[in-house]
Image (cartoon, helix red, strand yellow):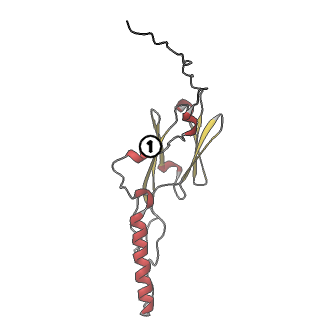
């Protein structure tokens, strides 16, 4: 009985993204941003204890990482990317071999100089996600739609030629 171990190993969609050298190791966990918020909260609690009003500074600019949902059926793969507040014209899709790159920019609204900001939680800036597509994804028939801040990419699946059946080779005794 032949066992196909490949079916038990999930496809690593983010292999290429994980290999990119320009992303800091903590990028996926947003460690620096979390640390910054923790320090802000600590000072906020301290200042309240001294009866000073709490005022938060604008958040540090961060590289955005839109959330990605990936689903599959027997016929296709569907990739949904959340990009709220981003215009369709500010999103770019690129296919290179079996690598899909989703990039764009969330632009900040025009600021008024006479405003005193008390809190800024929304993030602005560039984003980029790099997905390694499975071997059976038909990249020639990729379709993308954009609605209500969600980019949906559909990749039909193709049938992959099965490897030739395994045959056993007899080993003869050396003379």
Q: Picture coordinates of residue 124 (x, y %)?
A: 44, 61
Question: Which residue reaches farthest left?
Answer: 22
Judging by the rendered image, the residue that carries numbered circle 1 is 15
Vertical arrangement, residue 59 with respect to residue 89, above or below = below
Q: Quadrant of residue 72?
A: top right
Vertical arrangement, residue 42 with respect to residue 110, above or below = below
Question: Which residue reaches farthest top?
Answer: 175
Q: Report if residue 114 is visible in the image.
A: no
Q: Is residue 28 left or right of residue 162?
A: left
Q: Quadrant of residue 137?
A: top right
Q: Quadrant of residue 108?
A: bottom left
For label 1, the SS is helix
Residue visible at 53% across and 59% down in the picture: 85
Question: Which residue reaches farthest bottom?
Answer: 51
The residue lying toward the viewer, choosing from 165 and 90, is: 165
Q: Picture coordinates of residue 89 (x, y %)?
A: 50, 48
The residue lying toward the viewer, choosing from 10 and 41, is: 10
Residue visible at 57% across and 25% down in the picture: 160
Q: Quadrant of the N terminus?
A: top right
Residue visible at 58% across and 30% down in the picture: 3
Q: Picture coordinates of residue 46 (x, y %)?
A: 41, 87
Question: Which residue reaches farthest right?
Answer: 74
The residue lying toward the viewer, choosing from 96 and 12, is: 12
């Amino acid at each position: 009985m032949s066992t196909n171990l490949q079916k038990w190993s999930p496809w690593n969609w983010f292999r290429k993204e994980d290999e990119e050298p320009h992303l800091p190791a903590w990028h996926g966990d947003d460690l620096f941003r979390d640390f910054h918020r923790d320090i802000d909260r600590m000072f906020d609690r301290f200042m309240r204890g001294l009866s000073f009003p709490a005022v938060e500074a604008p958040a540090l600019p961060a590289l955005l990482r839109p959330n990605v949902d990936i689903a599959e059926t027997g016929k296709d793969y569907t990739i949904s990317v959340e990009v709220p507040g981003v215009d369709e014209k500010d999103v770019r899709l690129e296919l290179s071999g079996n690598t899909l790159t989703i990039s764009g920019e969330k632009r900040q609204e025009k600021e008024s100089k006479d405003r005193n900001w008390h809190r800024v939680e929304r993030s602005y800036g560039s984003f980029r996600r790099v997905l390694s597509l499975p071997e059976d994804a038909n990249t020639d028939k990729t379709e993308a739609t954009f609605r209500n801040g969600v980019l949906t990419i559909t990749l039909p699946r193709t049938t992959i030629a099965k490897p030739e059946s395994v045959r056993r080779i007899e080993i003869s005794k050396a003379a």
